[in-house]
Image (cartoon, grey):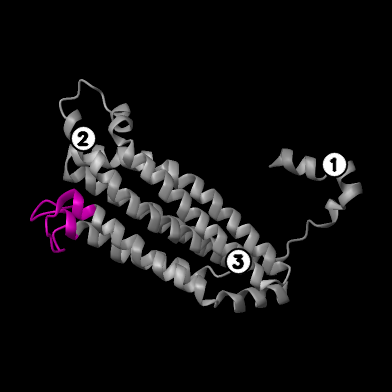
Amino acid sequence: MVLLLKIFLNRKICKQFQSHRVWWPHWHAIRYLFMLGVPLGLLMTSDLTGVALFQIMQVKLGVIEGAATQIVMMLISTAYMPTLGIAQAGTTLVGQSIGAGNMYWAKRLGNVAIALCILYTFVVSALLALNGHWLVPLFIATADPQAVAVTSLSQTLLWLAIVYNVFNALSISSAFCLQGTGDVKRPSLFAILFSWLGFVPLTHILTFGQEEGLVDFLPQLGWGVLGEWLAAILFTLTLSSLLFWRWRSGNWQRIGQTFNCSD
């Protein structure tokens, strides 16, 4: 921090950019930053904690199920992480278009970003599933007595992961495009409610049988690992549908216009 301040306030920078005159805090901008930042932080937190509990329940279910899920999650991250980059580009481009006062262009760029996220995710996820027979063994020791079972289950889960990943890409891209408009409160609320009050309890209900789960007060249907992934798919389907509907509804245009005028 001291080093950065020294650079920021050196004589050359101050002379060219007058950086020494902008030290006074702008409370309106700081307040607006918190209004955006806190909901965004909660959105990411709800997603990460939901997925973490999802994986914990897989491990609780069994060694094979936990290992297979971990392998699949690592593989599909090759589709998930670049999707985040595309979605963040959508955030920037949508925000710039709104700042320029062009709502039509903002909507068009957002639609393109969403389409690219879905297309990339589907192609990469399908390639992973088609090549799972040689990708999965890379993560398993050949001497492991459960290697065959883990490999077989991982290949099955990779096909389910295609559906999960596509809906997840729709969810992420829609949420990030809405962020570019300043519409963050409702999407964050949707994510928190559906993750903590929907996804996590449903995963537990569908996964564990009687006296197998982490808690005892929820119904337990005992569908195993397939029930757990079904819960993940239903969660992403529901959340992505709501977020995409909000983007397509155009309600964000009012928020964007308000921000643009106030800015």
Rendered image: mark on residue 108: 3
Q: Looking at numbered disc 3 in the image, what kind of residue is underneath it?
A: Arg
Q: Is residue 227 magenta?
A: yes
Q: Position of residue 51 (x, y in %)?
A: 34, 51
Q: Is residue 187 left or right of residue 146?
A: right
Q: Nearer the viewer, residue 239 or 132?
A: 132
Q: Residues within 10 Å of mark 3 (few under 14, many from 20)?
A: few
Q: Residue at x 18, y 60 (%)?
A: 205
Badge 1 element: loop
Residue type of the residue flagged with mark 1: Asn
- Residue assigned mark 1: 10
- The dot on residue 150 is 2
Q: Position of residue 164 (x, y in %)?
A: 34, 54
Quadrant containing the N terminus is top right
Q: Earlier in the sequence, mark 2 or mark 1?
A: 1
Which of marks 1 and 3 precedes in the sequence?
1
Q: Position of residue 92 (x, y in %)?
A: 63, 58
Give the image quarter of residue 67.
top left
Q: Say if residue 7 shows up in the picture.
A: yes
- Secondary structure at badge 3 equals helix
Report the side of 220 relative to 157 (left or right). Answer: left
Mark 3 and 1 residues: CB-CB less than 8 Å, in contact?
no
Magenta stretch? Answer: 205-228
Find out whether residue 60 is within the magenta segment: no
The residue carrying pointer 2 sits among few (fewer than 14), some (14 to 19) or many (20 or more) residues within 10 Å by Cα, namely many
